């Protein structure tokens, strides 16, 4: 099962800062959701992830993003991270060492395909609307853009506790729309990265691209 924790050595959790001062990244020595990305915001009633639900019981957090071997926590208050990090690390270590599930097994079996971690705009547990959005990308150009984001951009943003996903490409205007998640969402440096890094790379590799914007 994808969300199983090995019964060997105890689970360890390490905290890392991210370029986004509102987000920290908790890295574990065990797989959490290999090849998947699940983001849950506070107002969402979904019980898909008991781990996310447990973390969001802390009033300081506004959203939780779970991926391969890390969790990104977004702060919803002005509390000092230095005081909160030990609390979240202890919670994660106790939770994982107890063998509790990352996701609800039955629901995850049915829904996991919608949360595959690639650059395409997969389903998201978006709490502001209560709706699940997403859909497969189509066309040769979209597939090429998706591949570039996945192979060249996603590994870098994942190091910062974030994720980037392709939402759409308009071949008439040349506009690429992406969704930034985790630490990338609301990061002060994300606009610069989007234009100076991602947009320039896509323009060089896909001449049809004229602009990259984030929703």
Image: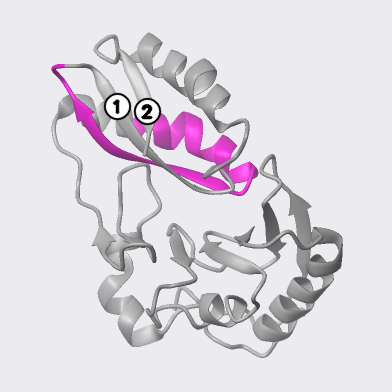
User: How far across and down, in percent of the image, does residue 54 sit?
Assistant: 58, 82
**SS at circle 1:** strand
Q: Quadrant of residue 63?
A: bottom right
Dot 1 and dot 2 residues touching (CB under 8 Å): yes
Residue with the mark numbered 1: 176
Within 10 Å of the Cα at label 1, are there few (<14), some (14-19), or many (20+) other Cα atoms? many
Of residue 150 and residue 208, the one placed in the foreground of this image is 208
Residue at the spot x=41%, y=37% of the render? 150
Q: Is residue 28 among the parts visible in the rendering?
A: yes
Residue at the spot x=43%, y=59% of the render? 36
Q: Is residue 22 above or below residue 159?
A: below
Quadrant where the N terminus sits is bottom left
Looking at the image, residue 96 sits to the left or right of residue 134; the answer is right
Q: Is residue 202 magenta?
A: no
CA–CA distance in space, label 1 to label 2 = 6 Å
| Mark drawn on residue 213 | 2
Give the residue furthest to the front: 78
User: How far across and down, in percent of the image, does residue 68 sit?
Assistant: 54, 59
User: How far across and down, in percent of the image, does residue 131 sit?
Assistant: 26, 65
Residue at the spot x=40%, y=73% of the render? 44
Q: Is residue 7 among the parts visible in the rendering?
A: no
Please give the range of residues in magenta. Answer: 147-172
Looking at the image, residue 44 sits to the left or right of residue 94; the answer is left
Q: Is residue 157 magenta?
A: yes
Q: Earlier in the sequence, mark 1 or mark 2?
A: 1
Tell which tag, 1 or 2, sits nearer the viewer. Answer: 2
Q: How is the image coloured?
A: one colour
């Amino acid at each position: 099962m994808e969300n199983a924790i090995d019964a060997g050595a105890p689970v360890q959790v390490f905290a890392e800062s991210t370029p986004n001062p509102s987000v920290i990244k908790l890295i574990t020595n065990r797989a959490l959701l290999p090849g998947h990305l699940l983001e849950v915001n506070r107002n969402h009633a979904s019980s898909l992830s008991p781990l996310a639900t447990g973390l969001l019981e802390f009033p300081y957090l506004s959203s939780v993003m779970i991926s391969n071997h890390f969790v990104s926590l977004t702060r919803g208050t002005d509390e000092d991270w230095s005081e909160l990090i030990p609390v979240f690390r202890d919670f994660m270590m106790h939770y994982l060492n107890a063998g509790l599930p990352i996701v609800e097994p039955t629901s995850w079996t049915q829904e996991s395909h919608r949360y595959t971690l690639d650059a395409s705009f997969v389903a998201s547990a978006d709490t502001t609307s209560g709706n699940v959005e997403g859909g497969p990308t189509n066309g040769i150009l979209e597939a090429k853009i998706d591949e570039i984001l996945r192979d060249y951009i996603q590994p870098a943003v994942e190091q910062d506790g974030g994720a980037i996903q392709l939402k759409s490409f308009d071949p008439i205007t040349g506009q690429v729309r992406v969704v930034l998640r985790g630490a990338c969402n609301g990061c002060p440096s994300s606009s610069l990265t989007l234009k100076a890094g991602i947009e320039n790379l896509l323009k060089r590799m896909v001449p049809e691209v004229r602009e990259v914007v984030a929703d």
